[in-house]
Amino acid sequence: PMDVPLAVQQWSGLIAVNYAARAKGVGRFMNAQEAKKACPEIQLVHVELIGEKDDPKTKSPDKKADRADSKVTLQRYRVA
């Protein structure tokens, strides 16, 4: 729904913020923790990652992505 605050997260920073989140004081380049303080109901989604540990077939559900061996990809947006 368009009235749900939502932001796209790249590691700990926000790279895209919808209008509902902006109305609550959340902006691009804000830290994810700051955004949660400003808008506790915000939904944060992390950009797609590529790397061996990010493969859904081999990734453990409790394992977080690691900046050292994961890269952000915007491929899905280039194809769209």
Image (cartoon, rainbow, N blue to C red):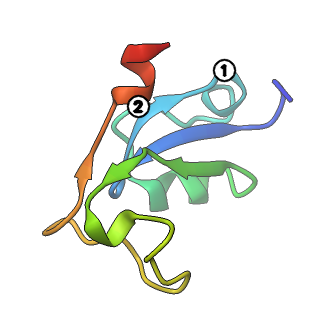
Q: Residue at x 27, y 67 (%)?
A: 52
Q: Residue at x 33, y 56 (%)?
A: 11
**In front: 41, or 23?**
41
In three-dimensional space, the C-alpha distance between marks 2 and 1, rounded to whole angstroms, equals 11 Å
**Quadrant of the rendering where the N terminus is positioned:** top right
Question: Pointer 1: residues within 10 angstroms few (<14), some, or many (20+)?
Answer: some
Q: Residue at x 35, y 57 (%)?
A: 12
Q: Which residue is mark 2?
A: 28
37 lies left or right of 69: right
Q: Residue at x 45, y 55 (%)?
A: 32
In this picture, is 67 found above or below 8?
below
The mark that comes first in sequence, 2 or 1, is 1
Q: Secondary structure at mark 1?
A: helix
Question: Pointer 2: residues within 10 angstroms few (<14), some, or many (20+)?
Answer: some
5 lies left or right of 35: right
Q: Secondary structure at mark 2?
A: loop
Q: Which residue is mark 1?
A: 19
**In front: 66, or 6?**
66
Percent from the top left, x then y, of residue 33? 47, 62
- For badge 1, the amino acid type reads Tyr
Q: Are marks 2 and 1 in contact (CB under 8 Å)?
A: no
In this picture, is 45 found above or below 6?
below
- For badge 2, the amino acid type reads Arg
Percent from the top left, x then y, of residue 64? 41, 77
Residue that extends furthest to the left in the rendered view of this protein: 68
When asked about the image quadrant of residue 58, the answer is: bottom left
Number of numbered discs visible in the structure rendering:
2
In this picture, is 65 found above or below 76?
below
Percent from the top left, x then y, of residue 40? 70, 58
Percent from the top left, x then y, of residue 41? 75, 53
